[in-house]
Image: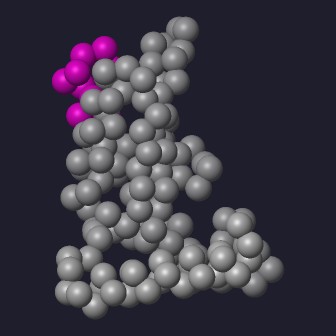
Amino acid sequence: MTFSRMLSTGFILTQLALAHCASGAEPDRSGGIVTDQTTSVAGQDFYRQFTTLWSDRPPLEFFSITVLERPSARRGRRIVVEYAQRTLFEAQLPASRAGIEQVSDDAVQIVYEHMANQLVQRLLFSEQDLAADEF
């Protein structure tokens, strides 16, 4: 793809976004993406519960969160939540499906709090020598 074609594509996407906002349509409250990289039924239950609880909170900024499931030989299945290529939450999935709700609630609270703190630090303490992800 040539540079001029990339510029025209970017211009078109910007115009579509502006037209969507001007049309009076409901703004997108998701604020970002939560990707699912789980493999088991318990992992998928965690992901569904996590995204349900996450969507109940006000959006902070655009984000990309990844929910991973990693098998562990000794501990069963481990769930990991990553944001900006950093692990923010890691826990063992409980054997019963009833305990998944509590684990996902804890994950949402920890991840949301961490993201809010990171946003406040970025707004209050801007350093021109560092990039946003190096703070």
Which residue is at a point 20% across and 86% down the rendered structure image? 24
Name the image quarter holding the C terminus: bottom right
Q: Which residues are magenta?
A: 93-103
- Whether residue 92 is in magenta: the answer is no
Q: Would you say the magenta stretch is mainly helix, strand or loop?
A: helix
Which residue is at a point 30% across and 82% down the rendered structure image? 20
The tally of labels here is 0
The spot of residue 81 in percent (x, y) is 48, 42
For the residue pair 64 and 58, the one nearer the viewer reads as 64
Residue 44 lies in quadrant: top left
Which residue is at a point 74% across and 77% down the rendered structure image? 3
The spot of residue 76 in percent (x, y) is 45, 13
The answer to whether 83 is drawn above or below residue 7 in the figure is above
Residue furthest bottom in the image: 22
Is 129 left, or right, of 36 in this rendering?
A: right
The spot of residue 23 in percent (x, y) is 23, 87
Residue 60 lies in quadrant: bottom left
The spot of residue 85 in percent (x, y) is 62, 50
For the residue pair 26 and 45, the one nearer the viewer reads as 26
Q: Tell me which colouring the rendered structure shows.
A: one colour
Which residue is at a point 41% across and 50% down the rendered structure image? 34
The answer to whether 95 is drawn above or below residue 21 in the figure is above
The answer to whether residue 49 is seen in the rendering is yes
Residue furthest top in the image: 74
Residue furthest right in the image: 129
Name the image quarter holding the N terminus: bottom right
The answer to whether residue 88 is seen in the rendering is no
